[in-house]
Amino acid sequence: MSPRRRYHVRWPGLVFAGLALLIGAASAQRTENMLVWVFASMLAWIVVSGIISGGMMMALRVRRRTPRVARAGESFEIRYEVASASRLWPIFDVTLSEVADLVQSPTRLEHCPRGGHAQVRSTLTPPRRGILRLQRFRCISGFPFGLILKSVEWNDPVDVLVHPRQHVVDPQMLRTLVGAAPGTHAALQRTGGQEDFIGLREYRSGDSVRHVAWRRSAARMEPVVIERAVPARKALVVTLDLSRTEGVATERAEEDAIEWTASVLSRAHADGWSVQLVIDGFAADQTEPSVLTGLATQLDALAVIDLIGPRQAPQRGTMELAAGTALRIVPGRFP
Amino acid sequence: MNDVIVCRRHALWLSMVSLVAFALSQRSLALGLAAIAVAGTSWLATSRCTRRMLHPTVVLVLVSVIAFVVISQVWPRLDPVRIPRWIGLGVFFGMLVRLWARRTMSDERQVVLLSGVLLVAAGLHSIDLAVGLLIIIGTALAVDCVIRFRLLTSDALSRTPHVPRARALRGKTQADRDLRQVILAALVLSLLTSVAIFVILPRNPNPGGPLFGSGRGTRLGFPTDLSLRSPQWIEPGERELLSVDWRGPDGKPPAVAETLRLRGQILDRYDPVEFRWFARIGPSQRFIINNGVDRSPLALSTIDERINVHTLQVNLRGLYTDIIFTPWVPISIRGLNAQVFSYSPGTCSLKLMDIETAGVVRGYEVRVQPFPSESALTALQGNPQRLPPRPTFPVEAVRATALQWMEEGGLRNLTTDGDSDERWARNIRIGRAFEERLRSTRFNYSLDLRGFIQREGRDPIDLFLNEYRFGHCEYFASALCALCQSVGVDARIVTGFIVHDYDASDRRYSVREADAHAWVEIRSGNVQWTVLDPTPVADDTSLASERGVWGQVLRFLLGPLEDAWRERIQRFDSLAQEEFVRAFNEWITRTYRQARAWPSAVAASLAERTGVPQAGVVWIAAVSVGAALSMSVVILLWRRLQRRRHLLGITRTGRMRAQIALRDGAFYADALALLAQFGCIRPVWQSPRAFATTMQSARPAAAEAFHAIIDRYYMIRFAGRRPDAARRAQDAALVERLRAALAAGTAHSR
């Protein structure tokens, strides 16, 4: 990935160059050597500016680090890890930005020592869900005199999966939605809260120290942990119907439906529900739509829905694991 | 320490330097001191309290007034000489106003910009040492200010509320140290580049041509006339203009230094309208072409040079003029380079003919006879066939004064009739009488003529004689010459130098600005002229004491500086460039030859000192080279060891422990270097495990391999488990596994 280096001439540099030429012409006409010295100094400034900024920018090494996922309408952080490969020139006053039409906060690196590292953060706000591809990012600086700007661009394509925008879903509202949907039943309630002993197993990285069975570990001369049963959670199946057989068939309505689906999923997972997601009415080559579990997977799936794709009649309809465990979201009909 | 205060303080220093530079260029030290006082007061009063700053409306009014004054002075006469001066003055006072109203970054930038304009304006008006040094210092300060303001402005512009500000540059942090070093590097590079460009820029061999500053106008000239509309205060300058090497008839320097009187311009006509003495164009001039090697005689016939002939070599230093300065009377001349001279027999004066095209004249050598015979003078001046007419003077009031003085001196009965001898005798008697009267206590010598107010309708010589009775040598000489001419005495004014300063160690006279003088010559024969000096303190060293002690003390300090400034900067022109190139080529050639001869010389020296034959010298050289190589290897290994210590963070451990960790943990350092090679540089603030975790998504295989390396390293470093040979081999294999994983694929960093 070889960077692209460019020069940008701005009006201060043009004015300075014009003044230098003017003083040069004046010193050529008059006989004062001091005026020649002033002209020489101005030319020297231009030369030195090029040397220092060139040395600084040539030594600039930048890595961009982005999160895997983001959320539409919310800022996510981009980190630029800057390193100076020069033992001679430190780096000052570098502005970093993405070469893209995005809403990004200005990022400026004040200083990076010679041979050292620095990190700057910037925030980017994706406007909509989907795959946000970041291609090129640029570092630009006018240090030391601001006469000429030098920029270095790196081409480092990276994809950020932007999850749908989420709205606030009240827990009561969720229960109401689940209860109000046709064919739904009250969520399965389980009583009791004791955790059942299952057995002992070997220690794995990440296990809490509190779960270590010390006496057994001492006896076996290796760490073992107690494995207990976790209480079963309430189950819910959320079906997003994008078949356009009913409801409003506009893209805006479908986007709203996707956002509400994401909101409901997040709320349900936060409340301890065991949630499954079915995206119905899509993909002509798919005989049965997948049942998705896990919030991250579900949000990823919602993020990559392409509304331009062909539709088909719903295959699964409303799935119920048990009475009162299904929620069907239809665009334009979701309250 | 706040960044903004540091920047503002540096801008203040820059403004002070520029203000003083401009004030000195206008020859007004008082103005410069006042400006410093105003600037310093503005800082003390307003740096921490903006309420004491001038209101923007007041600033606007003051600036408008200054602009109006400048435009009103410039507009009526668009004189290219006045315009830069008045613009400079406008910027000067505008800067003082702005220093009292610096609220925003824009105001600070204005201060820096105005300082730059003032420095340029100062350079346009003056090339003195002090101004030049201030311009150089100001340029350096400007570099510092521009860099600091650039950082401050960018930071202010980039800051938004929701983005945390980067670490500030304050105090003695690494960033502060780096910034100072960058500024220093920029200053040094700027200075060196400026010098290089200044030296390389082509100069026009013809002064005043289209190429860059020949330096001619920067050197002091010598007036070709004498104007009595003189400055009110003459500051006797200590700048050296000429140096004179005097050799007596025996070719040796004088044993006892005598006062040296150098004749320059001869003036014998007075303009009563302009109050100016000027030279009458002589009836005949001879052109003398000199090849710079042989002496060219001035006389038409041969003069016996065996009798009392002295030789002077005059070197021009800070003077640029076509007038040749010689004592009375020159009999031959040789230029230090080929030149053409014009010789005026009537006044025995010489001038340079081709100064306009031949560039710089370095000096000349003249042979003089202080007491020439009549035949020599006749050969030099020609034999006048008839007596010259008696001169007259156009100002009647002066004649009245002269007649009155003659009456009082009992000289009224001296008539103008008679033969030539009587005429010459009369000239001498009247001239000496007038000289004596002028040198009496009735007249005072002074350089301060602020009280000498010229009156409409009154001639300055009349005012000097009858009203003020004080003045400097020009007034005394003018008065004597005017008095003499008004009563028919053949008199003329001579302007030149009277020199007392003889350096016994260098055996030369130093002619300085303050040595400029004017006196009178009275015709005392057909071809003889007698010197009369009516200035009261002209012919002894008390004139030198009039300059003041401090000037002479500083002269020894400033003299070499001024010489260097004058020779290297002011007078740097096309000839100086040629000399520089020639000297540089000679230096290069000489250095190359010395470098080539050096090994042989060293070998011969070694052979001589040690008694070792040439072959032994070769053996010594081989051993030396081997020792140097060994030392290099040791240094490289030591540096590698230090880098590894820094990389592994081993700073304060026991010696043995450090060695164990370094040797046994070398595989970990190799792993870090390998990761850096593939672009994965571990930040110093991040732990190894955290760094490995961050690599997981982008390079899972490499992260896994690095995890294993970390585990092994921790066991060695902190658990004290020293590896055996087999274990070290396994550790090395882990590094190779990491290398393979890195080389295998590249995933985008996440």
Image (cartoon, coloured by chain):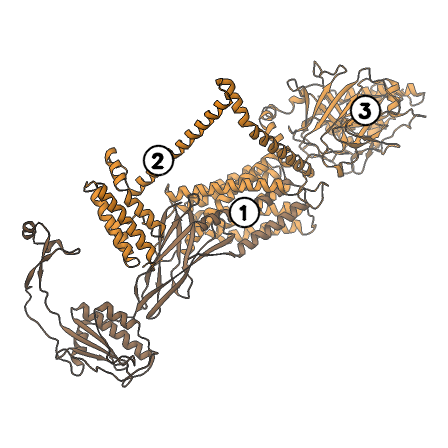
Chain colours: A brown, B orange
- Ranked by sequence position, the earlier of labels 3 and 2 is 3
- Residue A64 lies, in percent from the top left, at 36, 57
Q: Residue furthest front?
A: B615
Q: Which mark is residue B638?
A: 2
Local SS, label 3? strand
Discs 3 and 2 lie in a common subunit: yes
Q: Residues within 10 Å of mark 1 (few under 14, many from 20)?
A: some
Which of the 4 image quarters holds residue A139?
bottom left
State the residue position of label 1. A47
Write the residue at 67% across / 52% down: B75
- Tell whether B541 sits left or right of B113: right
Question: What residue would you read off at disc 3?
Answer: B332
Q: Quadrant of residue B656?
A: top left
Q: Are marks 1 and 2 on the same chain?
A: no
Circles 1, 2 touching at the beta carbon (< 8 Å): no
Label 1 is placed on what type of residue?
A: Val
Q: Report the Cα–Cα distance between label 3 and label 2.
A: 75 Å
User: Quick one: label 3, few (<14), some, or many (20+) residues within 10 Å?
Assistant: many
